[in-house]
Amino acid sequence: MDYSLCIFCQAHETRTNVSEATEHGVITVRNAACSRKKLRDSKNIDIIDRLEKAFESATAVSLVWHKPCYAHFTDKSKIERLQKSQTECSAEGAGCSSVVSSGNRRSLRKRVQPVNWSLCIFCQAENKKARLISVMTKQMSDQIIQASHLDYEVGLRLAGVIDLIAAEAKYHLHCLSAFNRSTVKTQHQSTNTDLAMIWLCQELNYSADKGHVILLDDVWERYKELAEESSTMIQPSYESRRGTFKQKLQSQLGDIFSFFQPLNRCISERKTVLIPTKYQPAALLQMKADI
Ligand SMILES: [Zn+2]
Ligand SMILES: [Zn+2]
């Protein structure tokens, strides 16, 4: 992010036409960002992210922007429309809520792409050479849909789908067996833990791959969301003692994350962060720069 460019569009070409943010302007933008975030404005996730970073940054930064970009972002009628479309959307039912998933804890949550039914429902890969097989029997369709609840990603993808034959779903044999293996494993695990925890760990595995550093507080918030989505009762011991939640998480994650508590702050502000073990040296350097 470059603070000398318009905070909204970050366009290099028009870097000269920017105006300095006024105090009033900053407050207006802050409110707009807050409303948009609450309304899960997925189109402006990047802008909202940037603004949050700017507002959170310890050293005061002065923002600049293009007047039209500012007007566009803070336009009340646009925000109202967002609100309206969301109410309509939630009225339509559960199938929709997963698609307009919030972008706030972005590093934790992948955005869900709509299913491309002409590709393998498991990998959605465009250029695999392997042969695609169509789902032909009701038994196969039911089996996949039922098991899909055990896989966070496929579960979201197939949310609301009741018949894979009608949807003309296709799969790679290899992907189907990988899916079966992993869902059977999850099924076993879920006798010892809850589904929300399993989904959470699947997301965290993905984040670890991407090298994201995550606050334990955010993980906890995300867990609560997933518990709601999966109708999981949150264990009272997780609520009362966050340490119990942390222990459980650590045992589930194994060594893909290191739990790390920065020491260079007063105790009340010390927040545990999760650092992907394989990115640890780079992450620590970055944290020194950020904190
Ligand atoms: Zn701009
Ligand atoms: Zn596949």
Image: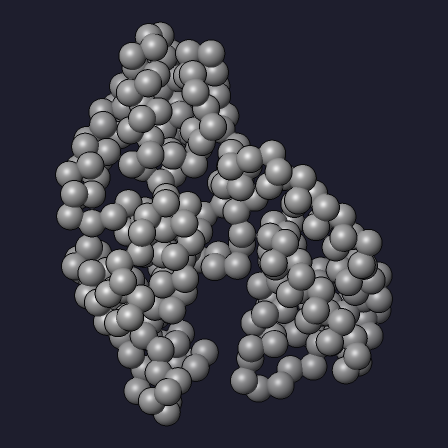
Q: Residue at left 35%, top 40%?
A: 152
Q: Nearer the viewer, residue 18 or 44?
A: 44
Quarter of image, res 282 = bottom left
Residue 216: quarter of image? bottom left
* Residue lying at 38% horizontally and 34% vertically, measured from the top left: 155
Position of the N terminus by quadrant: bottom right
| Residue 267 coordinates in the image, percent (x, y) | 33, 89
At horizontal 56% and vertical 77% (from top left) the residue drawn is: 56
| Residue at the outermost bottom position | 266
Asked whether 188 or 266 is in front, the reply is 188
In-image side of 57 versus 26 (left or right): left
Left or right of residue 119, residue 199 in this image:
left
Q: Residue at x 64, y 82 (%)?
A: 61
Q: Is residue 210 above or below residue 124?
A: below
Residue 241, given in percent of the width and then of the height, sits at 26, 72
Question: Is 21 above or below relative to 128?
Answer: below
Q: Is residue 169 visible?
A: no
